[in-house]
Image: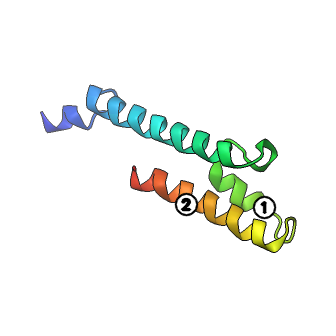
Amino acid sequence: MFALRNHPRSPRRRSAEADREALAARVCAELADDLPDEDLTQDLDDCLDRYELGSKPRCEEVEYLEMVQDAIDRIERGC
């Protein structure tokens, strides 16, 4: 029975994946409300990787980077 719960097609696994995807979508939507569209991509890790330091005024840059990292952390924690 244990093997069935961990099977990739099991209802519990699909539900957990769906919950994670819904959380990620909600967190990204909240972040998008606070940031201009051109600042975000679908993948938040990609946002950080592609960000060019010095492209914004320092105070905006720090706030932007903290907001994106906080969103990534929230998704990873599941809250």
Name the residue nearer the viewer: 17 or 64: 64
Q: Position of residue 69 (x, y in %)?
A: 59, 62
Which residue carries the number 2 mark?
A: 70
Residue 51 marker: 1
Whether residue 8 appears in this view of the structure is no
Circle 2 Cα neighbour tier, 10 Å, few/some/many (<14 / 14–19 / ≥20): some
Q: How many numbered discs?
A: 2
Answer above or below: position of 78 versus 42.
Answer: below
Q: Position of residue 64 (x, y in %)?
A: 70, 61
Quarter-wise, where is residue 60 in the image?
bottom right
Q: Tell me which residue sits at (77%, 46%) in the image.
A: 36
What quarter of the picture does the N terminus occupy?
Answer: top left
Q: Tell me which residue sits at (71%, 70%) in the image.
A: 62
Q: Position of residue 70 (x, y in %)?
A: 55, 60
Dot 2: element: helix
Query: On the picture, is 76 further left or further right than 6?
Result: right
Q: Are marks 1 and 2 in contact (CB under 8 Å)?
A: no
Residue 2 marker: none
Q: Tell me the amino acid under the disc marked 1.
A: Tyr
Answer above or below: position of 43 versus 15.
Answer: below
**Spatial distance from mark 1 to mark 2, Cα to Cα?**
16 Å
